[in-house]
Amino acid sequence: MPLTPDERAFLARLLRNRDQPPTVGRLLATSRVWLAIVLAMAAACAVGYVMLDDPTVPAFGLGAAAAMLMLGVRQMQLGQQYWPLVAELIDWNRLEELLAVDETHDQ
């Protein structure tokens, strides 16, 4: 079964997490693009909040950025919380087989 690049990356992430359960810190480190976008939005809103006479719109943007960050961290916490159950349900041999077959398929 040929895997898409996203599927291959997902399976490789699962395999990396088999021995070391995911932590919020590691998940944040692997979400650098998402985190950079949220922080850039927050920085732009913070500058607008200081520079504009009416800080209503930048304050809304800061609140939205904070909410996105909190939601992302909460989803990561849930992933960490349920990891032991997910790890028990995964057929690790099949996962390794899929990745191995896909690697030979690419060559």
Image: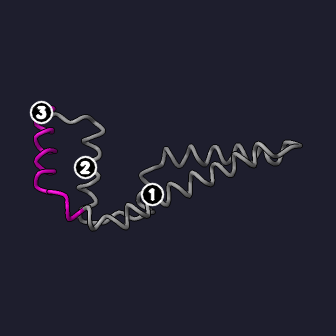
Amino acid beneath label 3: His
Question: Where does the magenta region start and end?
Answer: 87-107
Residue 105 image position (x, y, % from top left): 12, 33
Numbered mark located on residue 105 in the image: 3
**What separation in Å lies between label 3 and label 2 (alpha carbons)?**
16 Å
- Magenta region includes residue 92: yes
Secondary structure at badge 2 equals helix
**What separation in Å lies between label 2 and label 1 (alpha carbons)?**
20 Å
Marks 1 and 3, the one that precedes in the sequence: 1
Marks 2 and 1, the one that precedes in the sequence: 2
Does 24 sit above or below residue 64? below
The residue at the far right in this view is 53
Amino acid beneath label 1: Gln
* Secondary structure predominantly adopted by residues drawn in magenta: helix
Secondary structure at badge 1 equals helix
Q: Residue at x 48, y 48 (%)?
A: 32
Left or right: 32, with 37 as reference point: left
Numbered mark located on residue 12 in the image: 2
Residue 107 position by quadrant: top left
**What separation in Å lies between label 1 and label 3 (alpha carbons)?**
34 Å
Q: Which residue is mark 1?
A: 75
- Magenta region includes residue 8: no
Residue 8 image position (x, y, % from top left): 24, 42
Secondary structure at badge 3 equals helix
